[in-house]
């Protein structure tokens, strides 16, 4: 081959790799948000679905992930196009009392999120080392404070790298069992066909779908994108950022969705009919009995990484919410302390950890409309978004998704209060 041809091929290769490198340098914010989709609150539901109903509800997780992609991209787009976070935009549209009330409900949502994550991390330390739950919760809080210090001292990019590393640990920990599990791949493919088998599957599907979108990461993602990429972009750079954001959201939620599906497949292949999978401790015991201590240990490590990463992100979200709605900021150590206390009280009171997780998810369901509805309204307003306003087709899909999420969360709330859950 002549030197001229070699040089031409190298030039083509460089041009091909250039856009990929640019996209890689721009991804990260969505990976932080994606942690919410593999938090401890999802573990028991996924394992229960597989253990009780096999591959029947695989389609629910696939549908959930598609919804999440739309919602998270929309939030990121809002921050990039306007140069402002969703809480900041809402502040301009609310009076003083409205801002305070809105902030209060959003802070409760963030606190309940943190409650679930700290409890999940404490359970992981108990499973791994036999630590008392209160001590485990305190350790989780202290370590998460260190993670938040990375963001405040070294910037968002370094924080993103740390969270992405934890997400990798989560993926390995929760997917390790799938390697040795006896998975029926034909059955798994059959689970992509939407269907139910009795009221029990409807109830479980409602809980899985209803908890798809966490309200705190809807608020947060607009802040993450704006803070990472800055404001005042020209038209060309904005288009490049929106293109990179599609990859960011897509890749991160493919990973998160794969982890959730892997947990269901693991349970369907190896835990079918096992008892106790409706609690994290019971699921861990069932995994150990079926697949051995090494896989159970990997599961516990994944749970610990999930708790640490998601509680840090939840605390970060609370700061973004307060700063945007009230233009007030408190030191990160104080916020960490305030949001940690409820979890420590619950653990110290001897409450059932799984029950506490369920209660936190019920409270989260109440916050969904306050986050999802304003998001679609803002991104469908040409005065806010300009040429990047949602198209009519996107608006139709977005409103359908929001209506479905709100309805399912409302149904889950009613069923929980009536004792059906």
Image (tube, rainbow, N blue to C red):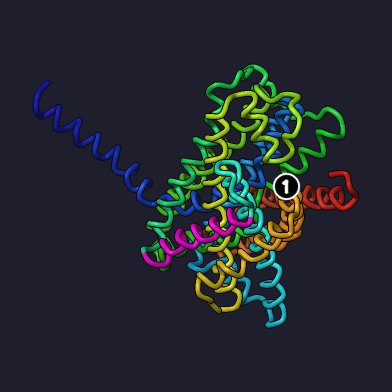
Task: Describe residue 182's horizontal placement relative to residue 246 as left or right.
Answer: right
Q: Is residue 234 above or below residue 254?
A: below
Q: Is residue 318 left or right of residue 168?
A: right
Q: Position of residue 358 (x, y in %)?
A: 75, 50
Residue lying at 61% horizontally and 20% vertically, measured from the top left: 183
Residue 300: image location, x then y, percent: 57, 39
Q: Which quarter of the rendering shows the N terminus?
A: top left
**Which portion, as a residue range, is magenta?**
134-153
Residue at label 1?
Answer: 354
Count of numbered marks = 1
* Residue 347: % across, % down: 69, 56
Q: Is residue 250 visible?
A: yes
Is residue 70 visible to us here?
A: no
Query: Was residue 137 drawn as part of the magenta stretch in this picture?
Result: yes
Q: Quadrant of the C terminus?
A: top right
Residue at image position (75%, 34%) is: 276
């Amino acid at each position: 081959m002549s030197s001229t041809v070699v040089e031409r091929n190298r030039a083509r290769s460089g041009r091909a790799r250039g856009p990929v490198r640019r996209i890689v340098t721009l991804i990260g914010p969505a990976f932080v948000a994606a942690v919410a989709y593999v938090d401890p609150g999802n573990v028991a539901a996924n394992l229960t679905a597989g253990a009780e109903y096999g591959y029947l509800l695989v389609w629910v997780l696939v549908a959930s992930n598609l919804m999440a992609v739309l919602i998270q991209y929309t939030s990121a787009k809002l921050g990039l196009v306007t140069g402002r976070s969703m809480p900041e935009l809402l502040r301009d549209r609310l009076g003083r009392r409205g801002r305070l009330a809105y902030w209060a409900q959003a802070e409760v949502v963030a606190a309940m999120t943190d409650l679930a994550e700290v409890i999940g991390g404490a359970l992981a330390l108990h499973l791994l080392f036999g630590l008392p739950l209160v001590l485990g919760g305190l350790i989780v809080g202290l370590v998460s404070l260190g993670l938040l210090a990375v963001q405040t001292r070294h910037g968002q990019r370094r924080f993103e790298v740390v969270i992405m590393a934890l997400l990798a640990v989560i993926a390995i920990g929760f997917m390790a069992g799938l390697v040795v599990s006896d998975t029926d791949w034909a059955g798994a493919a059959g689970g992509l066909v939407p269907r139910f088998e009795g009221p029990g599957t409807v109830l479980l599907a409602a809980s899985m779908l209803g908890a798809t979108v966490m309200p705190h990461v809807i608020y947060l993602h607009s802040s993450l994108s704006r803070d990472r990429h800055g404001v005042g972009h020209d038209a060309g750079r904005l288009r490049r950022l929106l293109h990179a954001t599609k990859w960011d959201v897509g890749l991160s939620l493919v990973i998160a969705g794969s982890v959730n599906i892997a947990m269901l497949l693991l349970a369907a292949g190896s835990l079918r009919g096992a008892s106790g999978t409706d609690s994290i401790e019971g699921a861990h015991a069932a995994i150990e009995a079926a697949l051995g201590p090494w896989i159970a240990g990997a599961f516990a490590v994944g749970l610990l990484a999930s708790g640490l990463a998601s509680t840090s992100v939840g605390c970060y979200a609370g700061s973004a919410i307060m700063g945007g709605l009230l233009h007030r900021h408190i030191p990160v150590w104080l916020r960490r302390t305030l949001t940690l206390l409820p979890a420590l009280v619950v653990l110290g009171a001897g409450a059932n950890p799984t029950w506490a997780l369920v209660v936190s998810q019920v409270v989260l369901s109440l916050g969904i409309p306050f986050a999802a509805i304003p998001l679609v309204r803002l991104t469908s307003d040409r005065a806010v978004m300009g040429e990047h306003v949602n198209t009519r087709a996107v608006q139709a899909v977005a409103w359908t998704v929001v209506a479905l999420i709100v309805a399912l969360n409302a149904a889950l709330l009613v069923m929980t209060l009536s004792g059906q859950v």
